[in-house]
Image (spheres, rainbow, N blue to C red):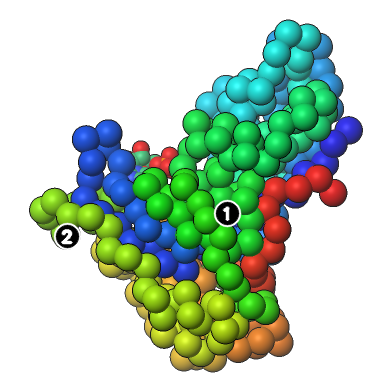
Amino acid sequence: MIRVEAPGKLNLALRVGSKRMDGYHPLNIVFQAVSVYDVLEAENAPEGVFELSVSGPQAHLVPTDDSNLAIKAARLLAGPGHGVRMRIAKEIPVTGGMAGGSADAAAALVACNELWGLGLGHLELLSLGKELGADVPFVVFGGTALGVDRGDELTEVPSRGRFHWALAFSDSELSTPAVFSEFDSLCPGSFEPPAVPQALLDALAAGDVYALADALQNDLQESALRLKPNLRSLMESRKLIGALAALVSGSGPTVAFLMRDEDAAQRAVTGLRALPGVRDAMAVYGPVAGAEIV
Ligand code: C5P
């Protein structure tokens, strides 16, 4: 049996260009992998059997058929004689803007590569990940990275020390395509994605949490807030819980609060859990490694 841990991600910068012919928006992203994990266990099954079960607080929201990205990932790697049974213990919020589905795909790639002795290297897994979804390569990559094109062409970003976050998981979902089309109506025209702020890269390199708080940027945030207005009051609770900054994660609705240190993050969680619209809250840190065997 192989067990793989795959982290969730935050977008510290998410810069969006106008929709391309292929329906995707070109992006410039700074990703950080953070310490909330989906854990995937995989064991051999008879040829052609691809099974999945999911546990965790939102398991009922996760499809376990061939539409699940983990099954797609296993099928992508499978050759003659291969089959797999997978179990996912799911902690990353479902459609929460933290790449939860992509984490499971990345975990399945890493697990099946090992289980079947395929010997694929890091670069091959990154390129297979791209076929599954734009965020999958980053979950394989881990750490802190700049992503361009669909956010799936990655280079490492120097980052010093550890940053602490309090995450507020929403009690409802937000559809990624809906947030992008809201962005299209808010920002009409044809344009390239703006560059990620140099101040953000400098703050990461210096490990300066205060400078980071000022440099976070998400071009989808306004669209997410329009579709889910109660996120505005959640973000305003920033002062109440002593956060340095509040940021919608990706297309939302998870909100990440940047905290001074671990103690502050732990304390903020208690405050966040009491707020309306919050399903749960969690203290995490980043950067952490990408999907890996444990
Ligand atoms: O990457 P993911 O499969 O989560 O994307 C879901 C949908 O979000 C896409 O089908 C597309 O409508 C929209 N999207 C986009 N531009 C991106 C990423 C996603 O328009 N760069």
Left or right of 57? Residue 250 is left
Q: Quadrant of ligand 1?
A: top left
Residue 118 vs 97, above or below: the answer is above
Element at label 2: helix
**Residue 20's mark?**
none
Q: CA distance from mark 2 to mark 1?
A: 27 Å
Element at label 1: loop
How many marks can you see?
2
Q: Badge 1: how crowded within 10 Å, few (<14), some, or many (20+)?
A: many
- The residue closer to the viewer here, 42 or 281, is 42
The image position of residue 51, as x and y in percent, is 71, 23
Question: Which residue is labeled 1 in the image?
Answer: 93
Q: Badge 2: how crowded within 10 Å, few (<14), some, or many (20+)?
A: few
Q: Disc 2 residue type? A: Leu
Residue 162 vs 174, above or below: the answer is below
Question: Which residue is labeled 2 in the image?
Answer: 186
Q: Residue furthest right?
A: 1
Quarter where residue 50 is shown: top right
Indicate which disc, 2 or 1, sits on the residue closer to the N terminus. Answer: 1
The image position of residue 214, as x and y in percent, is 41, 85
- The residue closer to the viewer here, 12 or 87, is 12
Residue at left offset 33%, top offset 62%: 15
Residue at left offset 47%, top offset 46%: 152
Q: Is residue 275 visible?
A: no
Residue at left offset 56%, top offset 60%: 156
